[in-house]
Image (cartoon, grey):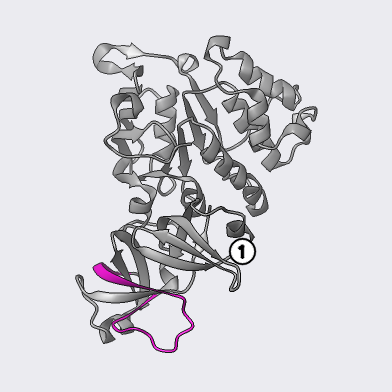
Amino acid sequence: MSSTMNNTASHDDTLDIALRLPRHGFTLDVQLQLPARGFTALYGPSGCGKTTVLRAIAGLERAAGHVRIGPQVWQDDARQTWLPTHRRALGYVFQEASLFAHLNVQGNLEFGLQRTPPARRKVALEQVVGLLGIGHLLQRSSSTLSGGERQRVAIARALATSPQLLLMDEPLSALDASRKAEVLPYLETLQRELDIPVLYVSHAQEEVLRLAQHVVLLERGQALRHGSAADILSHIDQPLTGNATAVLEGTLLAHDMADHLCTIGFAGGQLLLPAGPQVSSLSIGSPVRLCIAARDVSLSLTPLVDSTLLNSLPATITALRDDGPGQVLAALDVGGSALLAQVSSRSARALQLTAGQAVLAHVKGVALLR
């Protein structure tokens, strides 16, 4: 999928949503213009309205408002337009893989294919089978599949309908850690290879970090903010469900075979990373996504002397906030890129850290996601 996303996309490239629906404890009220390409994560705590948004887009919940995908209008209350779910060209992947028990894997996939008129078929079944690595499962009964295999088949069946939009409602939440690790690489492959927009519901930080190019942050039925994954996930006020982590989009610049290091360039400078198998297989110029946990960034006012750290970046503190007992979270601007640093309250007082202050950010660890 293309990773080009912005809020100024043309009408034909936009998913335009305005939905309002009273729920127990809050009212869902979202107005969003999202890129109609790539993975967009609806992200937030359990019960914030993520699934309700998906169900309303699909026509499974009757919210007030409108739903448009480019020129296609699925709902427009002002014009009394409403398409029932079966007339919306969408694929839906639920938390639990709902396969037909009386059909084998091949039969489940063909069911999805048969729902789509030949003239609208844009996704070849063979392509989907290959991307999700399920060719060896085609003759298996769906009742004999593992949880990870079932979910991959469910995703393949949804894609076999050549949807204009793929909706995924926490598709990994029912899987244990090993099964999640099995399925995530396949989702990353879909993100790269298929030009189908995906709305992905999750409250799991790891999934959003690895998959999303665009993020909508929801809380109590409201969209607090939305934008690129790097902007939203690196925001100091982001109510993360895991450890505060900044996202950087970069490019592989060089391999250092002698020291087994690689150089990654990003908007704020360069970083040296160990050249493990994942990065060694990449060619120069390949795009990569980096995640840097706030706990892996320390600050100083002057350069460190005789240090083993490989990465020190000039930065400016843009904001500070308390981050639990004895901890302070600092938002940093590194040449236009956002970074986060978690430091002790004692260190923040000793260095007299304030917004606008120039510091050096020392990066102790970087995770290369793709």
Where does label 1 land, which residue?
A: 276
> In x, y percent, where is residue 57?
40, 26
Q: Residue furthest left?
A: 356
Q: Secondary structure at mark 1?
A: loop
- Say if 110 sits above or below 9 in the image: above
> In x, y percent, where is residue 261?
55, 69
For the question of whether residue 219 can be seen, the reply is no
Asked whether 256 or 41 is in front, the reply is 256
Asked whether 318 or 281 is in front, the reply is 281
Quadrant in the picture for residue 50: top left
Residue 314 on the magenta segment: yes
Question: Which residues are the magenta region?
Answer: 298-322
Residue 48 on the magenta segment: no
- Say if 227 sits above or below 34 in the image: below
Q: In the drawing, does residue 48 fall left or right of residue 92? A: left
> In x, y percent, where is residue 162?
54, 22
Residue drawn 41% across the image and 57% down it: 247
For the question of whether residue 332 can be seen, the reply is yes
Magenta-drawn stretch, dominant element (helix, strand or loop):
strand
Label 1 CA crowd tier, 10 Å (few <14, some 14–19, many 20+): few
Residue drawn 24% across the image and 75% down it: 358
Quadrant in the picture for residue 49: top left
Residue drawn 58% across the image and 10% down it: 118
Residue drawn 74% across the image and 32% down it: 135
> In x, y percent, where is residue 265?
42, 60
Amino acid on which the number 1 mark rests in the picture = Gly
